[in-house]
Image: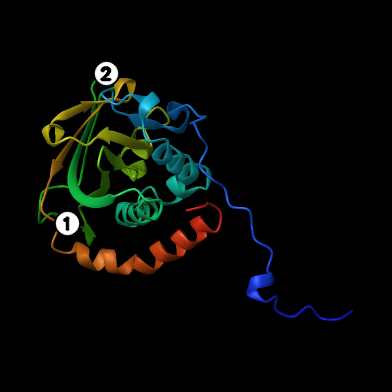
């Protein structure tokens, strides 16, 4: 049999890429996704919800939900390539579910590091939303299956440093902070992984 050799790029069969659905076909609570009560789920940008479901179903949330710098820079890059303006922001995350007796702080004030670990937290903001998708270790693993895996809050200038309600999932206050002095190295170290995972994502999904 004659060897096929390398298939010229212009003749290679094209893989069918997945488009966004026209509507969201999942219940966020089934995915451990907490959405702020002030957000109307029926009118949300369905692309952001579907990116979350892709991250969840592809294993990114469970495998990397404890790496906030990697996850947030990956999410920012993917959203921008989907045409959604997105930025990263370092914050202090104050979580509480008083009915269950849960309280957690993620990202302590400037200067606190523990065992060589930088105690800072970072998330993604879009025009309308706060996307905090890397809390699995601090919240979900700490409090169990009833605790959220990720949050979508409302991005409004008046709501920063104020409590946002997430119903049965509890409440969050996101407090803005100056970037931790040591995080530039962390961002640099995860840069290649962000590129690789972005390429893997868009080998499956259409931009």
- Other-residue count near label 2 (Cα within 10 Å), few / some / many at <14 / 14–19 / ≥20: few
For this orientation, the residue located farthest to the front is: 10
Q: Which residue is mark 1?
A: 113
Mark 2 residue element: loop
Residue on which disc 2 sits: 99
Instruction: Answer whether residue 115 is visible to the viewer in this image.
Output: no
132 or 144, which is in the foreground?
A: 132
> Residue at 30% of width from left, 41% of height from top?
131
| Residue 106 versus residue 41 in the image, above or below | below
Upstream in sequence: badge 1 or badge 2:
2
Work out whether residue 129 or residue 10 is closer to the camera in this orientation and state it.
10
Q: Is residue 111 above or below residue 95?
A: below
Q: Is residue 19 above or below residue 197?
A: above
| For residue 110, side relative to residue 35 (left or right) | left
The reply to whether callout 1 and callout 2 are in contact (CB within 8 Å) is no
| Image spot of residue 100 (x, y percent) | 29, 21
Instruction: Return the x and y of residue 81 as percentages of the image width and height.
Output: 39, 55
Find residue 66 and report its horizontal and vertical position in percent: 35, 49
Image quadrant containing the N terminus: bottom right
Location of residue 62 by image quarter: top left
Marker count (numbered): 2
Residue at 48 percent of width and 42 percent of height: 56
Q: Is residue 108 left or right of residue 52?
A: left
Identify the residue at image location x=69%, y=64%.
Answer: 13
How was this image coloured? rainbow
Residue 177 disc label: none
> Which type of secondary structure does the marked residue at label 1 adopt?
strand
């Amino acid at each position: 049999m004659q060897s096929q050799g390398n298939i010229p790029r212009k003749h290679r069969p094209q893989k069918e890429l997945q488009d966004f659905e026209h509507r969201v076909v999942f219940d966020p609570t089934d995915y451990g996704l907490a959405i702020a009560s002030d957000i109307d789920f029926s009118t949300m940008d369905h692309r952001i919800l579907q990116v979350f479901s892709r991250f969840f179903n592809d294993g990114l949330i469970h495998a990397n939900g404890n790496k906030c710098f990697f996850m947030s820079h990956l999410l920012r890059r993917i959203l921008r390539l989907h045409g959604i303006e997105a930025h990263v922001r370092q914050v202090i995350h104050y979580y509480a579910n008083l009915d269950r007796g849960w309280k957690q702080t993620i990202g302590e004030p400037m200067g606190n590091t523990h065992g060589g670990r930088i105690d800072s937290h970072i998330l993604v903001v879009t025009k309308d939303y706060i996307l905090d998708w890397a809390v699995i270790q601090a919240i979900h693993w700490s409090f169990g299956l009833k605790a959220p895996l990720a949050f979508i809050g409302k991005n409004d200038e008046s709501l920063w440093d104020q409590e946002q309600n997430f119903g049965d999932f509890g409440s969050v206050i996101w407090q803005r902070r100056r970037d931790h002095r040591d995080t530039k190295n962390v961002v640099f170290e995860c840069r290649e992984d962000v590129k690789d995972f972005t390429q893997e994502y868009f080998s499956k999904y259409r931009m």
